[in-house]
Amino acid sequence: MSRYSFLTAVIVFTAVLAAEGCSSPPKVAVRPNEHMEIGWTPRAIFQSPSYAVWFDSGYQHYIPSEEIIHALRTMQDSVGIVVVYGTWCSDSRRELPHLLKVLDASAFPAERLTLIAVDRTMQIPAGIKERYAITNVPTIMIVYRGVEVSRIVESPATTLEGDMRDALGPIFGGK
């Protein structure tokens, strides 16, 4: 194989891996020496040393739009958020601290946030993948009066707070 062909193969392989994000389940659910949450989790788990490094940094450095946060404060009645994520997933590690910062800034009621951690195969907890039609993580579902009105998969189209405002704006009479 020529050097050019080898480099091309490496570039293509790297691009394929990068494009997959956190969707392609590897053959093993847990890697050696890896700590992984599974199931319904309290927000407090992100304070554990296993997660605090990436969580604290992402939370502190994210600066949500004050204008959008102000709008979200008026759009909370009957809204819930369900998040299916993986502590092993780089997209989840990036978006979860940002989401929680947005929810904190907008004074979103903690009891209306549901966090569900999945393994690398997205098969544990049993039935989660099918129940919520999960293809990639994180999947952030915005629910209004028990009905999903929008979802953000892996990353927002604009910003988390912007996508949330865009989803809820029509329900609450504006953006």
Image (cartoon, rainbow, N blue to C red):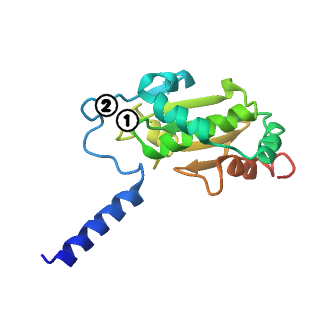
What residue do we see at 65% from left, 47% from top? 160
The x, y position of residue 57, in whole percent, is 53, 36
Q: Element at badge 2?
A: loop
Would residue 44 be found to the left or right of residue 75 on screen? left
Residue density around tag 2, few if under 14, some if 14–19, many if 20 or more, within 10 Å: few
Toward the viewer: 146 or 90? 90
Tag of residue 168: none
Can residue 145 be seen from the camera position used here?
A: yes
Q: Quadrant of residue 75?
A: top right
The x, y position of residue 40, in whole percent, is 50, 26
In the rendered image, the quadrant that contains the N terminus is: bottom left
How far, Cα to Cα, is label 1 from label 2?
11 Å
Kind of residue at badge 1:
Asp
Mark 1 or mark 2: which is in front? 2
How many numbered tags mark residues here? 2
What residue do we see at 60% from left, 41% from top? 61
Q: Which of marks 2 and 1 precedes in the sequence?
A: 2
Q: Element at badge 1?
A: loop
Q: Name the residue under label 1.
A: 119
Q: Name the residue under label 2.
A: 34
The x, y position of residue 158, in whole percent, is 65, 56
Can residue 138 be seen from the camera position used here?
A: no
